[in-house]
Amino acid sequence: MLYEFARPFLFALDAETAHDLTLASLRTAQALHLPVACTVPSARPVRVMGLEFPNRIGLAAGLDKNGECIEGLAALGFGHIEIGTVTPRPQPGNPKPRLFRLPERQAIINRMGFNNHGVDALVANVRRSAFQGILGINIGKNFDTPIERAVDDYLACLRKVYAHASYVTVNVSSPNTKNLRQLQGESELDGLLGPLKREQAALAQQHGRHVPLALKIAPDLDEAQLKVIADALRRHRIDAAIATNTTLSREGVEHLAHADEAGGLSGAPVFGKATTVLGALSRHLGSEIPLIGVGGVMDGQSARAKLEAGAQLVQLYTGLIYRGPALVKEAIEATRDA
């Protein structure tokens, strides 16, 4: 109810300004120990990647890139929180403006470009947090790291976040870092996932626990590309896949204000494409590797549809911007008996 009053004010602001203000408010609430918890529907816990999730609904990466608001976001009822994408070194991201609302279609276009304070700052924030739930940390490469050296950045991040994460997501699908999506190719995936799995094994021995690795893929993939990815996931024994990131397509938003802005499109228009990719990946993998469905979850029905397409868990982000915390409750209720 409170968000219904706040939304007109937030939407009157530039999109990134509203985003920053929202995070600042959550940080203040955390620091002052103000009550922000929402009533969360009861749900049957679900075991995925060897982890027990209190419900199937999580927050997708991108909202809290630096892990500054983990407790405040968790209080909204999410069964897991994913922070990042984080890179080894701090970077400012792309020039502003770089975040645009398309309210007629409940959509957002962003070209943020992995703006973040660097992995050391994120780890420091996680250490300060009192959050005891499931925390995913999403890792990427710095914009100026050559694509042929990308594995070095992912390994550097993995080593630093491993002890603090419930699982780690390898982001090879953002459209806003030059050439990043090339890492979804067969040889590129082998060159990335092989070293990451070897490092995961070494870190598991060092820390005495296995931290799962998930791969986040794009929605702009054809059937042949999806088969290549599925085979790589199976070959390297990756613990989960997240389908999908934002799309470069503008189908469904043509001729709207900001539709011609560069960047990835998220929200309602990406639901069909993302869910199709999710379903195709599920057919290729069967029950071998768990899937997390994300993209266009705007209500309980669309959250349930992700499970029906083959996901074990569901994530949302843009829907939270348009619907507020009520969406989290609705999505939990729609998926709790699945």
Image: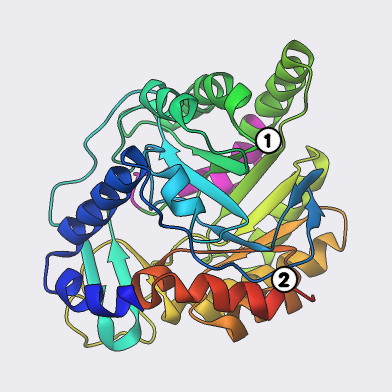
Q: How many labels does the image show?
A: 2
Q: Residue at x 18, y 78 (%)?
A: 8
> How many other residues sit within 10 Å of disc 2, few (<14), some (14-19) or many (≥20)?
some
- The way the protein has been coloured in the rendering is rainbow
Residue in the image at 66% along x and 27% along y: 196
Secondary element at tag 2: helix
User: What residue appears at the point 45 percent right and 43 percent down from the top-left corner?
Assistant: 70
Residue denoted by label 1: 190
The numbered mark, 1 or 2, whose residue comes first in the sequence reads 1
Find out whether residue 48 is within the magenta segment.
no
Q: Where is residue 19 in the image (x, y as percent from the top left)?
A: 25, 57
Q: Can residue 296 be seen in this view?
A: no
Question: Is 43 or 271 nearer to us in this picture?
Answer: 43
Mark identifier at residue 208: none
**Magenta-tinted stretch:** 176-191
Where 320 sits versus 162, above or below?
A: below
Q: Give the labeled residue for mark 2.
A: 280
Amino acid carrying mark 2 in the image:
Ala
> Where does residue 38 sit, x and y in percent of width and height?
49, 65
Q: Position of residue 185 (x, y in %)?
A: 59, 47
Please tell me in which quadrant of the rendered image residue 324 appears.
bottom left
Q: Which amino acid does label 1 sit on?
A: Asp
- Residue positioned 22% across, 51% down in the render: 20
Q: Main secondary structure of the magenta part?
A: helix
Residue 113 in picture, x, y percent from top left: 30, 46
- The reply, left or right, for residue 219 in relation to residue 69 is right
Q: Quadrant of the C terminus?
A: bottom right
